[in-house]
Amino acid sequence: MKRTLAWLLLLCMLFTLLAGCGEKTEEETVDEITIVTPEPEPEPEPEPIIENPLTGEAVTEEVRARRPYAVMLNNISVALPQYGITQADIIFEVVAEGGITRMLGLFQDVSQLGSIGSVRSARSYYIDLAQGYDAVYIHAGGSPQAYSDLKAKGIDHIDGVNGNTANVFFRDQGRIRSAGYEHSMFTSGERLTNYVDTIESMRHTHKDGYELNQQYVEDATPAGGEDAPLIRAYFGGGKKTSFEYNAETKLYNVYEYGAPYIDGASGEQVGVPNVLLLFTNVSQISGDNKGRMDVRTTGEGTGIYACGGKSVAIKWSRAGLESPFSYTLENGDPLPLNIGHSYVCILHNGATVTLTDE
């Protein structure tokens, strides 16, 4: 009996030990993890794109508000190359006396521009073009009619011949030797900016209410337009300007006098996405012993617009001397221009223009 009780006690002890091994000596816990997904922050409103009114390219608000500079540029062959011309937002080429042309380069911002020139004398219709863009007009001398208009119309201008502007212009000695004294006058972006900033009587920003109202798009190639891979515009007197389309750059490369139209400052050929050929009345001023010309730049007329290797017939208009050019398609719809620079040839009605090499 005692032996049996001893075995029973021993078995109870074994069961107790085995049961204890299966118990947890410490309480095991698992921390709960709460995943919080933050609410997405509202995306900021995109900054409005401030456009250069002459090109549609992005600029600062300060640059957009500033009046552009309209610079008279010599284009007689002996005085080439011009300097700074690839930086012009709009190039106007118009006939001058003697069967030659001159350019009016419009620059919205010259602050970073080096030498510009050579600068040449004023004519009334170039003044009219500058006035339409509310520009400060830069020239070196001028015809009697031009000086009369500058005074009568109160045009803000900087004259390199008749004016206290020795710090604005300089003579290039090499150009004097190669082309002559009258073809040697230059200025620069820094000189123009520094001078204008000191003239309190000259308005530095656009007048109230001024708007160009020109639409710009990424690709203004005319839908269904006529092929225009090689444009030749004949001004008369043997002067011809050509535009050859480059499909890789999507620009028209400019040629004159049988050679590329080169910027002497950069060594680059002038190339633009927009070519405009405007037809108007051109005549010699009656009784002018120098053979000076008169060119109508207001009212209405017809023209051709080329972009992307294609061309389309257009109409142009200017309500008055203080208005810029306005362009429409033949049906009256506004003509959008390609973002970038423009080259505008102002030609006499009936001038020859070809669009291909055929």
Image (cartoon, helix red, strand yellow):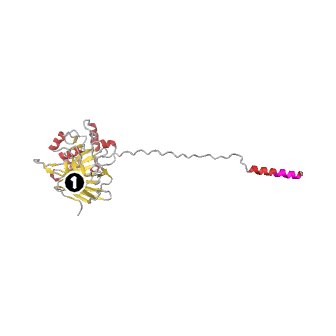
Q: Does residue 199 belong to the magenta stretch?
A: no
Residue 236's x, y, as percent? 16, 55
Residue 217's x, y, as percent? 32, 52
Magenta segment boundaries in residue numbering: 3-11
In the rendered image, which quarter contains the C terminus?
A: bottom left
The picture quadrant where one finds residue 312 is bottom left
Q: Does residue 8 belong to the magenta stretch?
A: yes
- Give the residue number, with chain letter if any, for mark 1: 303
Q: Pick out the residue farthest to the right.
A: 1
Do we see residue 80 in this rendering?
A: no
The foreground one among 183 and 130 is 130
Which secondary structure class fits the magenta region best? Answer: helix
Secondary structure state at the residue bearing disc 1: strand
The foreground one among 305 and 170 is 305
Residue 274's x, y, as percent? 27, 53
| Amino acid at pointer 1 | Gly
